[in-house]
Amino acid sequence: MNASYLELQGIRKTFGDTIVLNDVDLTIREGELLTLLGPSGCGKSTLLRCIAGLTELDGGRILLGQKDIANLPPRNREIGMVFQSYALFPNLTVFENIEYGLKMRGVAKKERISRCEELIALVDLGDKRDAYPQNLSGGQQQRVALARSIAVKPKVLLLDEPLSALDAKIRKNLRSEIREIQKRFKMTTVFVTHDQEEALTLSDRICIMNNGQIVQDGTPESLYSTPRTEFVARFMGSYNVLSHMEATRLFGEGIGSAASFALRPESVRLLSVNKSTNEYDEIAAGKRIIEGTIDSVHVLGNVIRYVVETTGVRLTIDILNDGRSLRTDEQRVVRLALDPSQLLQLEKEGA
Amino acid sequence: MNQRKVGWTHRSLMLLLMIYLLLPLLGTFLYAFAKEWQTTVLPESWTLEWIREMFRDARFLDALWTSLYLCLISVALSLAVMLPAVFVITVYFPKWETFMKGLVVLPYAVPGVVAAVGLIRTYSSGFIDITGTAYILIGAYFIVILPYMYQGIRNSLLTVSAVELLNAAELLGASRMRAFVTIILPNIWPGVIISTLLSFSVLFGEFVLTNMLVGGHIQTIQVYLYQRVNESGHLASAIAIAYFVFILIVSTVLMKLGKKFNKVVGR
């Protein structure tokens, strides 16, 4: 495997006075699925369009297998793309849509047919091969779009929020299908999304973007467990972000000098007031016990989310919904076990 | 029960509208075949004399033919210029759209008489001396149908999200020209046909500009109709009905052709 198959160097893009991409550097390995994750307007889609050649760069280089493709027109880049709106050709059938790229590249008819049949079978649309796009459901349309873009065997596949127009169940199915196909063909893939759950389940590596910059990148596990900045902590989950003062109130002195801290909601444990036996165990394990009042309780399914007010700080606490956990009333006093080793120091934004 | 009631009101409204729209036409139609029609609701006696007289007059067929080819040339010219132009503006220079929108409503803002006087003054001397010829008429017709063509083509392009389709086609390896011909054109064709038809009908019924620009030299069907109205109401009615039937036939043929063409390209 090639360690730097697709390499972006100092990509810059401005629209008028706004800087959309500010010196973005990114390296993608061959066969890797990389996700660009960020809120809308962070520049992730623009970056994708720059790679595809649909948006012109204001500066920087794009190397694909040692070749600079930044000045090539889209059709010569050997990059495939799936759009959020599918962009299927309404005047062509499913089969013809998939065949289109092969036709444009002058592939012989016999080979075209066998390749198309193979792909139609892959995305499981055998009975729809002669249907027109407007007669397909959203999920089916997106499968056709996927098949169409991989038909020409592109070196890199770009997916621009391909699932956001679909409903939840189809989204989940298609998500795992995309991942399966990507793994089977070892497709180097860049996936853009604003949905952190999607990014976590799908990716080999995630790049979190904000204001036209990549603020942190890493494996899903490392990003989730160790966010570096407040933005990442807030974006990756329901982290409690605490100021230095709030953290000192909860954990006492000696927690470090950072201006803000992050605390994972599932790292805090709830103890009921009168069961003092396991409280000693917790103290022995180096945890701090603090009293608080339950503000609200939400059942999210497999997790129960408590919002607890303690020493003037509102903490979000997630407890696994294992049937034994106390479905406590609001306004009740509880005791919390805080683990100082779970407290993360956050860097300043833009550092 | 409720639904049936709604359907009923709907239908009667439609019927009223149809009567309102078709009544004048029906009157004209009857008048074209009436011999005596003074004090009764319906004509007392019928005749085909007016129709016969109309076809006996060589000027009628001439005028019809003149109108037909002048309108066809103008619409074809407009199509040839506007289709690529609007495509390029919508897809590659969306910033120019505001300018185009302003430009395109100008024909509405300038009354026909003013436009005609201005055109005659401009083109009656100097390098381009084309007043009274078919060229000035075709030029003026081009401007008259500009709004219909521009809006029609632009709306079709936006409806099929041409930019996205073009991007997708280009990424699949198609050149811009090829993408336009294989993807964009077949998808916007129905809309383009409609605007072409609309433009054609508008031109066919155009009178003010035509009469002022070339009235003495070239007789279109409208100019001819205007001259005959004063001679006999019956004859004018016959001409109007013939004109209507002709437009109906042309529209149907164009519509059918459009559908057929669309299918051929689409498959």
Image: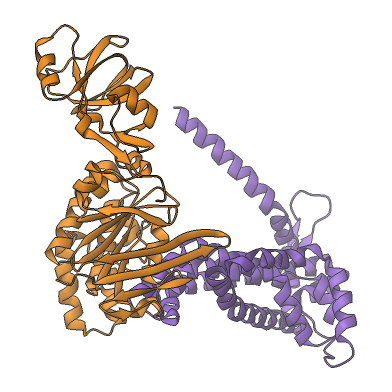
Q: Residue drawn at (30%, 72%), measured in percent from left and top?
A: A79
Q: Is A329 located above or below residue A263 in the figure?
A: above
Answer with the quarter of the image where residue B64 lies: bottom right
Q: Residue drawn at (79%, 70%), measured in percent from left and top?
A: B235
Q: Give the purple chain's letter.
A: B
A48 to the left or right of B105: left
Residue A246 position, x and y percent, is 37, 26
Q: Residue drawn at (35%, 44%), measured in percent from left and top?
A: A347
Q: Quadrant of the N terminus of chain A?
A: bottom left
Looking at the picture, tell me which residue is in the foreground, A102 or B233. Answer: A102
Looking at the picture, tell me which residue is in the foreground, B13 or A41. Answer: A41
Answer with the quarter of the image where residue A342 lies: top left
Looking at the picture, tell me which residue is in the foreground, B213 or B150. Answer: B150
B109 to the left or right of A169: right
Q: Is B156 located above or below residue B52 in the figure?
A: above
Looking at the picture, tell me which residue is in the foreground, B231 or B196. Answer: B196
Residue B212 position, x and y percent, is 86, 76
**Residue A348 visible in the current orientation:** yes
Q: Residue drawn at (30%, 43%), measured in percent from left and top?
A: A167
B135 to the left or right of B179: right
Q: Chain A in the picture: what colour?
A: orange
Q: How is the image coloured?
A: by chain
Q: Residue furthest top?
A: A274
Figure label count: 0
Residue A202 position, x and y percent, is 21, 52
Q: Is A313 located above or below residue A203 in the figure?
A: above
Residue B119 position, x and y percent, is 85, 79
